[in-house]
């Protein structure tokens, strides 16, 4: 791979070791892996993502981590624009077994066509080097079609986790790219029921996979945890939110409820993206503690009295299915949310989450939620609802569909 240009910011780089495709026989096949077919190569998975692996741990990380237990995963991120003309290079990290994070580095200021051509050229040597011959192409962003036109995967999956065209800064060409991806994809997965309803007529094989949970991980918050140092001095009652703080976050609602109840304290965890710090409400009872790692979340959750979903009601949130909804519930916390459609259905309808649309409703809903903190009957109802909701189940259903699609395509060639 090209060396970094002189003066370029250094970062960890790993050259992927040569490895051949794996052929699994009946005797050593993994019966829990629908992608294992006796006597045939185990496919790799090449994922094209608009989110970075080391960003907030969410749907892509949950799903890819489970694929990594069985097959090689190459997670291709969007470029960093820190290169210099002629100094383009490809960074490859190997942070975990069976995972390679692939990051193109390009000069800033390039036109879109030049960007895509640059990424395509950087990726080309990766496939023969690693003998990525039999693979699944997995798209989180349709924009990746601009540099993957020549790939010939076994199966193409579009995991539509959000309506990206509604996000701030979305390129106008995105909708055209998504139309093309629907034509290329063998399977389409959606991140929630609302997205499924919006996309189901656009493809013959669309499947809803709403947000899931790792119950054991978040159940740690039900037991007393040492309060993290930056949260320990914050008075109770505490009301918390974690996630990306961007145009989907209801700034006005947070500011309004904090002003209405100065005796309540609001703990906000997560990176601030696409909005400025100056836009955020500030006050002595609003505490921005920054981004926290996935393993840290139960410790913070344990110290909250109520968990919040403070999403604005706008185009960017119309189809979201927040992963944190079942996570908050698995942590044993009462939950109050704005009326996001995929939260109202089913969590609000099942009386598992309180729904509030404005400051007055939020104050009333939080007060009710506070009274439920030790309600064992409510918790039993929550646990029964969450019983069949896990990322392991989601992964297995997805992998089964992919295995079936591979078999169909192989049989059609014979």
Image (tube, rainbow, N blue to C red):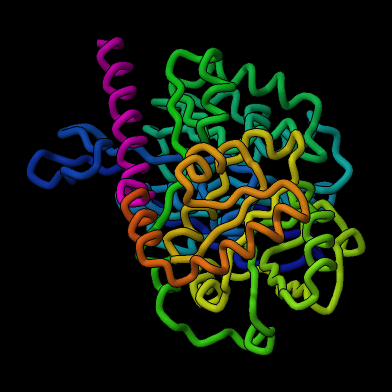
Picture residue at 85% right of the left edge, 68% below the top: 259
**Residue 387 drawn in magenta:** yes
Q: Quadrant of the C terminus?
A: top left
In this view, the residue in front, 269 or 406, is 269
**Residue 277 drawn in magenta:** no
Report x, y in % for residue 348: 53, 44
In this view, the residue in front, 328 or 123, is 328
Q: Quadrant of residue 168?
A: top right
48, above or below 142, in the image: below
Picture residue at 47% right of the left edge, 53% below the top: 326
Q: Quadrant of residue 399?
A: top left
Q: Is residue 8 visible?
A: yes
Residue found farthest to the left = 27
- What span is colored magenta in the figure? 386-414
In this view, the residue in front, 308 or 128, is 308
Report x, y in % for residue 411: 25, 14
Report x, y in % for residue 339: 65, 42
Q: Is residue 124 visible?
A: no
* Secondary structure mainly formed by the magenta segment: helix
Report x, y in % for residue 71: 34, 47
78, above or below 152, in the image: below
Picture residue at 54% right of the left edge, 71% below the top: 301
């Amino acid at each position: 791979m090209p060396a970094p240009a002189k003066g370029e910011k250094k970062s960890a780089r790993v050259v992927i070791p040569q490895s051949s495709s794996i052929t699994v026989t009946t005797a050593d096949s993994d019966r829990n892996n629908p992608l294992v077919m006796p006597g045939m190569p185990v496919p790799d998975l090449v994922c094209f993502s608009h989110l970075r692996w080391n960003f907030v741990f969410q749907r892509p990380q949950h799903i890819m981590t489970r694929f990594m237990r069985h097959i090689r995963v190459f997670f291709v991120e969007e470029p960093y624009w820190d290169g210099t003309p002629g100094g383009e290079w490809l960074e490859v990290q190997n942070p975990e077994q069976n995972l390679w994070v692939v990051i193109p580095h390009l000069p800033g200021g390039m036109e879109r066509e030049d960007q895509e051509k640059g990424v395509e050229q950087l990726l080309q040597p990766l496939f023969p080097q690693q003998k990525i011959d039999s693979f699944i192409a997995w798209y989180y962003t349709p924009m990746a079609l601009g540099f993957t036109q020549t790939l010939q995967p076994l199966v193409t999956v579009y995991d539509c986790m959000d309506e990206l065209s509604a996000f701030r800064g979305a390129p106008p060409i995105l909708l055209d790219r998504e139309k093309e991806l629907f034509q290329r994809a063998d399977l389409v997965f959606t991140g929630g029921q609302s997205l499924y309803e919006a996309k189901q007529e656009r493809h013959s094989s669309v499947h809803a996979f709403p947000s899931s949970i790792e119950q054991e991980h978040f159940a740690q918050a039900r037991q007393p945890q040492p309060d993290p140092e930056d949260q320990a001095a914050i008075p109770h009652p505490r009301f918390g939110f974690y996630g990306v703080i961007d145009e989907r976050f209801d700034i006005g609602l947070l500011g309004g409820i904090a002003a209405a109840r100065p005796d309540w304290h609001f703990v906000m965890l997560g990176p601030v993206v696409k909005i400025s710090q100056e836009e955020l409400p500030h006050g002595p009872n609003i505490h921005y503690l920054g981004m926290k790692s996935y393993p840290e979340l139960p410790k913070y959750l344990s110290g909250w009295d109520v968990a919040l979903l403070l999403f604005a009601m706008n185009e960017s949130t119309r189809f979201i299915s927040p992963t944190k909804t079942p996570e908050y519930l698995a942590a044993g916390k009462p939950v109050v949310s704005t009326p996001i459609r995929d939260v109202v259905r089913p969590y609000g309808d099942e009386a598992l989450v309180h729904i509030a649309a404005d400051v007055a409703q939020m104050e009333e809903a939080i007060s009710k939620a506070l009274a439920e903190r030790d309600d064992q009957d409510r918790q039993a109802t929550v646990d029964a609802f969450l019983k069949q909701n896990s990322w392991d189940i989601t992964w297995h259903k997805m992998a089964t569909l992919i295995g079936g699609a591979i078999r169909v395509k192989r049989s059609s060639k014979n």
